[in-house]
């Protein structure tokens, strides 16, 4: 009889212990898995545009897992909820960064297009003229034509990068072409008399 009571008491104690342990365990486990899934879904874009935030979310999941493994389920749940929030913000942050870079590309492209169009119009005007304005020679015109051709190719290369998903590199390349366009346009401006005299 005493033996039966002892076994029953032990079983009851085990059930009580399990009951004390489990309330936060399942929610913590679910939150950790949810955070991991959100990170995986956003990983590709986040790695490109918000790598620091991606790392922060991954670190938060790792911290939640460590607490879970240690049996600190309430703390693991809190950490997992924080990780899930960080993971949930990844997609939004990545999209915002992509939109920002895309806007920068469009602005630089519009500026470069305007500069190149002005160069083309100036070249067309000079070709129609019977003779070049004083202070402008044929060599400068040819250099401008060659520069425009090179600029067109460089823009095409930058556009290929943009299409391939190398957005930040593409924007940097395109912005780097703006000063070059300014230099080409300057070649088509007649040199000042003092500059002409110095050349002679």
Image (spheres, rainbow, N blue to C red):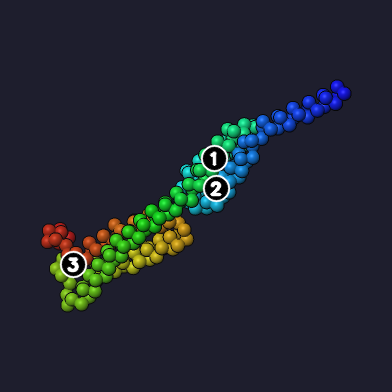
Look at mark 3 in the image and give the residue it sits on. Answer: 136
Distance Cα–Cα, label 2 vs label 3: 61 Å
Question: What SS does tag 3 mark?
Answer: loop
The answer to whether 15 appears left or right of 198 in the picture is right
Q: Vertically, is 134 above or below 2?
A: below
- In percent of the image, x 43 and y 56: which residue is there? 167
Mark 3 Cα shell of 10 Å, populated few (<14), some (14-19), many (≥20): some
Q: Which mark is residue 19?
A: none
Label disc, if present, on residue 81 of the rendered structure? 1
Residue situated in front as seen by the camera: 186 or 7: 7
Within 10 angstroms of label 1, few (less than 14), some, or many (20 or more) residues?
Answer: many
**Proximity of marks 1 and 2: CB atoms separated by less than 8 Å:** no
**Which quadrant would residue 65 be assigned to in this image?**
top right
User: What x and y, as percent, mark residue 74?
Assistant: 59, 33
Residue, disc 2:
39
Q: CA distance from mark 1 to mark 2?
A: 13 Å
Residue 22 in which image quadrant: top right
Earlier residue among tags 3 and 1: 1
Position in image of residue 97 (x %, y %): 42, 51
Task: Give the foreground label among 1 and 2.
Answer: 1
For residue 51, above or below residue 140: above
């Amino acid at each position: 009889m005493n033996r039966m009571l002892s076994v029953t008491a032990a079983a009851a104690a085990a059930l009580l212990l399990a009951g004390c342990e489990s309330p936060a365990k399942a929610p913590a486990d679910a939150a950790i898995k949810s955070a991991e899934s959100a990170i995986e879904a956003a990983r590709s874009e986040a790695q490109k545009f918000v790598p620091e935030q991606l790392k922060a979310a991954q670190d938060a999941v790792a911290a939640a897992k460590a607490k879970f493994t240690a049996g600190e389920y309430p703390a693991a749940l809190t950490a997992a909820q924080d990780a899930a929030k960080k993971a949930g913000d990844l997609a939004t942050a990545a999209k915002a960064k992509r939109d920002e870079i895309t806007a920068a590309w469009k602005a630089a492209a519009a500026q470069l297009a305007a500069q190149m169009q002005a160069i083309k119009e100036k070249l067309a005007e000079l070709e129609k003229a019977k003779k070049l304005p004083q202070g402008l020679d044929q060599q400068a015109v040819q250099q401008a034509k060659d520069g425009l051709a090179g600029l067109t190719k460089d823009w095409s290369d930058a556009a290929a990068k943009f299409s391939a998903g190398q957005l930040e590199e593409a924007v940097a390349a395109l912005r780097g072409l703006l000063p070059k366009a300014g230099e080409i346009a300057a070649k088509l401006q007649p040199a000042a008399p003092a500059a002409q005299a110095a050349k002679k």
